[in-house]
Image (cartoon, rainbow, N blue to C red):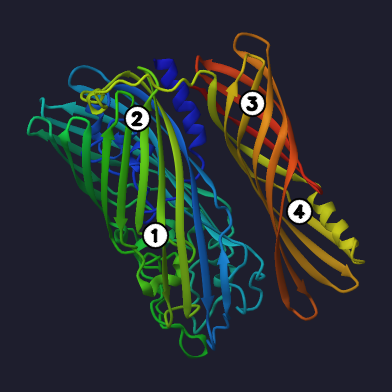
Amino acid sequence: MRFTLKCAALVSACMATFPAYATNGYFLPGFGIRSQGMGGVGIAYGRDSLSTAANPANAVNTGMRGDLGFAVFNPERHAAVSDPGNAAGFGFFGNTESDAKYFLMPEMGFSMPLDDKLHIALAVVGNGGMNTTYPENFFSFGGPPDTPARDAKLGVDMMQLLVPITVAYKVNDNHAIGASLVLAETRFRAYGLEAFQLFDAGGFTITSDPNHLTGQGFDYSYGAGIKLGWQGKFIDDRLTLGLTYASRTYMTKFDKYRGLLAEQGDFDIPENYGVGIAIKPAKNLVIAADVLRINYSKVASVGNPGMSTPIGTNGVPSITDPSKELGNDNGMGFGWKDQTVYKFGVQYGINNRLQLRAGYNYGASPIPDNMVTFNLLAPATVERHYSLGFTYKANENLEVTGAYMYAASNSQSACGQNIVNCASFNMHQNMFGMTFGWVLDPGPGELEEYGDSNWGGINFDGWYAGLGVGQSHYRDLASSIDSAVASVGATSTTSASPLSEGWKIYGGYQFNKYLALEGGYTNLNDAHANTTITAPSAGTIRTNVATDAWSLAAVGTYPITDKFSLMGKVGAAYVLTEITASATGSGSGTTASVAVGDDSYRPVYGVGVSYALLDNLNLRAEYERFDLKDINIDLITAGVAMKF
């Protein structure tokens, strides 16, 4: 057991460096795929080890188990700005959509009793995050001299990882208390904000430190806090109440962005607290609800207001107090209000192997309408979340849990406010997730929450699923663009940024130890190139190529030892490629943009190695090539494959 948990912790900790993207402000709706299938509830009801991140007292109910899973998160974000007639010089910019639409969200945890009363747990979960990658920079068009080009990218990337280390104590049969030391890490970067480095109107320069405002790459912050919880059971265990309190998590400062975030780069995790209730009208029916309060306004970089009124005559801002400049103790922030989140979930045990669940989650947007401009970078505007989920008990020791969540589209807009005068943004989200639970000793009451009727279950023998993360490489991108330019009688020089993050999820069926059939989804992310046209007229072209693929391949395996095998694959992929190009004539200064799609079936092949870490868990490292018409894309990944 110790070996299993250590290996699971190692794998998940490595994967957890990837960002998570949240929906209650920047917090996740719930901790764990099971919780998110019930609207994010977890204060009064939790059965997996990940629920200890919601309420430390849950550890007395989870038994001895380990959980390992991931979700694919799909946020769709749009923004538009305009500044008609404003002396600051920012002009109209139509609707633009953020790139990077698919993200992995890993999670893991384990829990175990030390005796009848004392229990311990550890979880590795995403607390939340924010991400935008706008392909065109609406903070540069028509702005001050020497601001970035309109086709320069603009955005932020922030993720928070929590590692609660939990101790819970069962006071008696009806009451339990718990406490967690919550370790935290935040990763952050911002880019494309050079216009604010140069902005100077009436002595108000917006930032206190222009050299640490934007484009500094990733910076990391670390910290810790505490979380306390209580649960009480009443009316013969038919009613459970829960309380939680999480202190402010004090983090080290983002030194690279001390000219952007208030208090010289401080970005603490806000205090939050909540109450929960769970009712069991029947032993296989659970109805639960939580109310959570998140005090965003108490963290200066999040809660301090930005400019709330328009820039005045001749570009002079309405706020001229230097103490309000970005990066200062009272510096401008995102202006978020405190948020109250309401969560509701239902779970029903169909039979002795299957549970179904559904949920609803609501939290009013924390963004005031007069704070829209800065929040274009982090449009945490969705409010209503709908979810469905299930848990299937494959055998006495293995649970498979899945969930789908849809966050309904929500928009915010305002005019006559700040910097660009008029701004609007919109977001909706999809999330698909799956978690595997190894149950060595179920918690009290867990088995009763399945139904009474017997079901033989599904035969999963031979089936497996996995994920891999790594790096994609767009080969021959620069030469392909130069060849395309040459085909129309022009000459050019292109420099490319061909490397990007890549990941995949897949499933397959192993016919025997030598042959399997495998299909899945691969996100090859995107690559960029800048082209300088030298003849017949001067100009520049910025090209972005974004690619993902659905593939089906035969996988051959050759065992070298009982645990170590060589792999090879060959198959076909339906490759979806979107190419966006923006051209600027140096003489006229005019800009034209065009976007085209190039979707086709293309061959895919690769090689790899596999190592059987456990009986049903393999580590895999692979190299694959997607053979496109004009360029080839290589993908190198490392990950895990789970046998059912």
Quarter location, residue 439: top left
What whole-number distance in Å separates the C-alpha atoms at marks 3 and 2? 36 Å
Q: Which mark is residue 449?
A: none
Secondary structure of residue under mark 4: strand
What whole-number distance in Å separates the C-alpha atoms at marks 3 and 1? 39 Å
Q: Quick check: marks 1 and 2 in contact, CB under 8 Å?
A: no
Front residue of 444 and 644:
644
* Mark closer to the observer (3, 1): 3
Q: What residue is drawn where x is 85% and y is 52%?
A: 479
- The image shows residue 327, relative to residue 563, as above or below, that is below
Q: Which residue is mark 1?
A: 382
What whole-number distance in Å separates the C-alpha atoms at marks 1 and 2? 30 Å
Q: Amino acid at mark 2?
A: Leu
Q: Earlier in the sequence, mark 2 or mark 4?
A: 2
Q: Which mark is residue 122?
A: 2
Residue at the bottom extreme?
Answer: 313
Q: Is there any visible trace of residue 39 in the rendered image? A: no
Q: Which residue is mark 4?
A: 496
Q: Amino acid at mark 1?
A: Val
Density class for disc 2 (Cα within 10 Å; few <14, some 14-19, many ≥20) is: many
Front residue of 359 and 137:
359
Q: Which mark is residue 517?
A: 3
Quarter location, residue 262: bottom left
Secondary structure of residue under mark 2: strand
Q: Earlier in the sequence, mark 1 or mark 2?
A: 2
Secondary structure of residue under mark 1: loop
Q: Earlier in the sequence, mark 3 or mark 4?
A: 4
Q: Quick check: marks 4 and 1 in contact, CB under 8 Å?
A: no
Q: Quick check: marks 3 and 4 in contact, CB under 8 Å?
A: no
Front residue of 342 and 265:
342
